[in-house]
Amino acid sequence: MASTIDITSYKGNIINGQFVTTPATRHSIDPATAEPLYEVPVAGREDLDSAVQHARNAFKSWSKTSFTERAKLMLQYADAIEANRDEIEKLLTQEQGKPLGLSNAEVGMALQWLRTFATMEVKDEVLEDTEERTIYSTFPPIGVCAAIVPWNWPILLGLGKVGPALMTGNVMIMKPSPYTPYCDLKLGELAMSIFPPGVFQVLSGDDSLGPWITAHPGVDMVSFTGSIATGKRVAESCAKTLKRYVLELGGNDAAIVCDDVVLDKCIPKIAMLSFLNSGQICMLCKRIYVHENIYDRFRDAFVEFTKNNIKTGGGFEEGVTVGPVQNKMQFDIVKDMYDEIQKQGWKTALDGKVRSDSKGYFVEPAVIDNPPDESRIVVEEPFGPIVPLLKWSSEQEVIDRANSLETGLGTSVWSKDLGRAERMARQISAGSVWVNSHFDVAPNVPFGGHKESGIGMEWGIEGFKHYTNSRSLWVWKNIFE
Ligand code: NAD
């Protein structure tokens, strides 16, 4: 019988299969109302030490469990989440701000991811097999892993680390963002009755906790998703103990629209993939390059579609695409970008608006009309519902412009001519490139960034291997004959 959760009550961090309270508590807020949400623990150093100690003990037996046993528990865990999904989705909208339909999609993806992870085994590879010897590549788990999770997709990005770590025989300590601790704590609570103690623990804390984790000598590997600036700090800290790490960092994706597209078919997709989650997704259309032959028609239809179909409002309201920006820090960054419109004299195709009539962090979509390439709205990741349209004329020129930044997370090319689109796609430096789509992800497909967008990949067997060491095993067969 799956356990049920009470989303209004947080009994402590999840350490060794128990709730552990902390002397101090804190809360985050509902970004739609700026009202405080529930009290959660603030992990101290002693909590981290304790979790690491229990994780190290748990690793001894968990690393020896069979793939079948791990898969069985992973599927049970997915079922337990599914049994509580209505409450979890409500909580996600409360704490993150995203519309309820998107919370539903995030939980649905997380379930699909866990169930697919349960089928993905990293198998030994035979490199040579002769009469004399067999040489294998084998992939033992690393040990105690830590998941450091951002606030934009706390469920999918959290479980997207937990699943592969556990399936490859590691144990995991997950640290949610202080802005969105609630769903991740509940995911830990649901795991308590399924995985052995110490295998999957959750520590919620304040801003000190992340740096303590990356510096801790008992943590062997860190899987981090967040901003580029923090990613560099994580890498620097991990270097001191030579921890393994995977970094999934910021992006500033280009969408390249060729002049043979059918506008009605691609504009709804490109507009949705610009403003989804209020622009707070690492891989969204953040610079839209439109061929000069269709630029004016594209711009006008894009604005028309956005005005008529992309509604801003609270996540529990019907038909909303753009919920509140998640937190005050991000709201200030987005407001600053909207202030630049006036200051820099950028032409707008859609003015957008920062709402001042609400305590929540609401911003309406803005579309900037062909600003200079070096303007902040083109070179920075705004992480808000504001996007520039840019004009291009030659294939090589637009590829160079798409590749010109230090980020390289995703890029899309939109064209009826698949040969041309694929030729262009193959010249892009980014971890994911799509033809006639954007932001496709799947549990069996590796995902990550080039250049400053990250190091290493998540998901897919390639992502699983980042939770393993590579061990070459040489077996000589005949020396005693
Ligand atoms: P952030 O870097 O501020 O925080 C991410 C996490 O790191 C949080 O849990 C935070 O508490 C923790 N943290 C902060 N300082 C730390 C430190 N010194 N050491 C260790 N941990 C620390 O990022 P954010 O604002 O939560 O997320 C938004 C950013 O994440 C955007 O830039 C976005 O593009 C990026 N992102 C990337 C991906 C990807 O997969 N590539 C996915 C989602 C978001």
Image: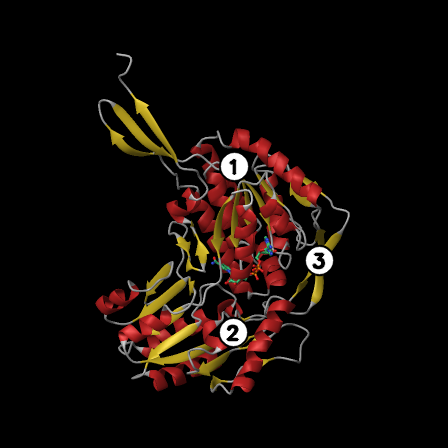
C-alpha separation, residue under disc 3 versus residue under disc 2: 26 Å
Question: Which disc, if any, is residue 449?
Answer: none
Asked if residue 40 lies left or right of residue 211, the reply is right
Residue underneath mark 3: 27
Give the residue drawn at x 42%, y 70%.
285
Give the number of the mark in front: 3 or 1.
1
Beta carbon at label 3 within 8 Å of ligand 1: no
Which image quarter holds the C terminus?
Answer: top left
Of callouts 3 and 1, the N-terminal one: 3
Residue underneath mark 1: 143
Which image quarter holds the N terminus?
Answer: top right
Beta carbon at label 2 within 8 Å of ligand 1: no
For the residue marked with disc 2, what is the amino acid?
Pro
In the image, is residue 307 above or below residue 149? below
> Which x, y percent locates residue 323?
57, 70
> Which quarter holds ligand 1?
bottom right
> Which x, y percent locates residue 236?
54, 51
> Which x, y percent locates residue 464?
42, 44
C-alpha separation, residue under disc 3 versus residue under disc 1: 32 Å
Of callouts 1 and 2, the N-terminal one: 1
Residue underneath mark 2: 385
> Which x, y percent locates residue 357?
66, 80
In the image, is residue 320 above or below residue 75? below
Near mark 3 (Cα within 10 A), the count class, few <14, some 14-19 or many ≥20, is: some
For the residue marked with disc 1, what is the amino acid?
Gly
Give the residue drawn at x 49%, y 42%.
165
Picture quadrant where residue 194 is located:
top right
Give the residue drawn at x 33%, y 64%.
428
For the residue marked with disc 3, what is the amino acid?
His
Q: Secondary structure at mark 1?
A: loop
Q: 247 or 447, which lies in front? A: 247
Give the number of the mark in front: 1 or 2.
1
